[in-house]
């Protein structure tokens, strides 16, 4: 694992407790965004491990779907988590019409935990394989 991949995984892992703290302080929209970024950084780490970098969120998400979900290297539901989390992040960052529900944030927090765990296991298996 390169230092850059390790740094992205570190950012992903640090984003999780930040999301939990924000949620606990009732900053739901910011918590959802931080949980999304936890998954986004993990996706970037996976792609970078394969020598791929992208300049947009959409490109990272599409490449993750193509390289890991469609190839069944990781559970395809993780791609759905990433897509749905991005939607929640956009709602939290740009939406002003309705507040985010607590259940939505709890769900995206669980997704980010599962996503990062899967990414770490994959990268560890690639290293030993």
Image (cartoon, rainbow, N blue to C red):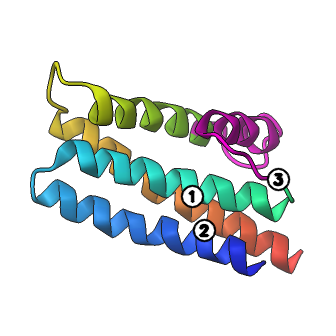
Q: Position of residue 64 (x, y in %)?
A: 71, 42
Direction from residue 55 to residue 11 in the image, left or right? left
* 129 shown above or below 65: below
Residue projecting furthest to the right: 129
Indicate the secondary structure of the residue bearing disc 2. Answer: helix
Tell me whether circle 2 and circle 1 mark residues in contact (CB < 8 Å).
yes
Q: Disc 3 marks which residue? A: 52
Q: Position of residue 34 (x, y in %)?
A: 36, 54
Q: Residue at x 66, y 68 (%)?
A: 121
Ranked by sequence position, the earlier of labels 1 and 3 is 1
Tell me whether circle 1 and circle 3 mark residues in contact (CB < 8 Å).
no
- Mark 1: few/some/many CA within 10 Å (<14, 14-19, 20+): many
Q: Disc 1 marks which residue? A: 41
User: Is 42 or 106 nearer to us in this picture?
Assistant: 42
* Residue 73 on the magenta segment: yes
Q: What's the CA distance linking mark 1 and mark 3? A: 13 Å
Q: Disc 2 marks which residue? A: 8
Q: Residue at x 53, y 75 (%)?
A: 10
Ranked by sequence position, the earlier of labels 3 and 2 is 2
Tell me whether circle 3 and circle 2 mark residues in contact (CB < 8 Å).
no
Q: Where is the C terminus found, in terms of image quarters?
A: bottom right
């Amino acid at each position: 694992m390169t230092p850059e991949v390790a740094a992205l995984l570190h950012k992903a892992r640090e984003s999780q407790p930040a999301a939990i703290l924000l949620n606990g302080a009732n900053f739901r929209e910011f918590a959802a965004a931080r949980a999304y970024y936890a998954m986004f950084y993990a996706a970037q780490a996976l792609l970078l491990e394969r020598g791929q970098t992208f300049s947009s969120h959409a490109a990272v998400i599409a490449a993750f779907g193509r390289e890991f979900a469609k190839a069944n290297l990781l559970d395809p539901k993780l791609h759905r988590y990433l897509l749905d989390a991005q939607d929640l992040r956009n709602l939290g960052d740009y939406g002003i019409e309705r507040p985010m529900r607590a259940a939505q944030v709890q769900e995206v927090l669980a997704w980010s935990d599962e996503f990062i765990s899967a990414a770490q296991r994959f990268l560890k298996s690639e290293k030993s394989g």
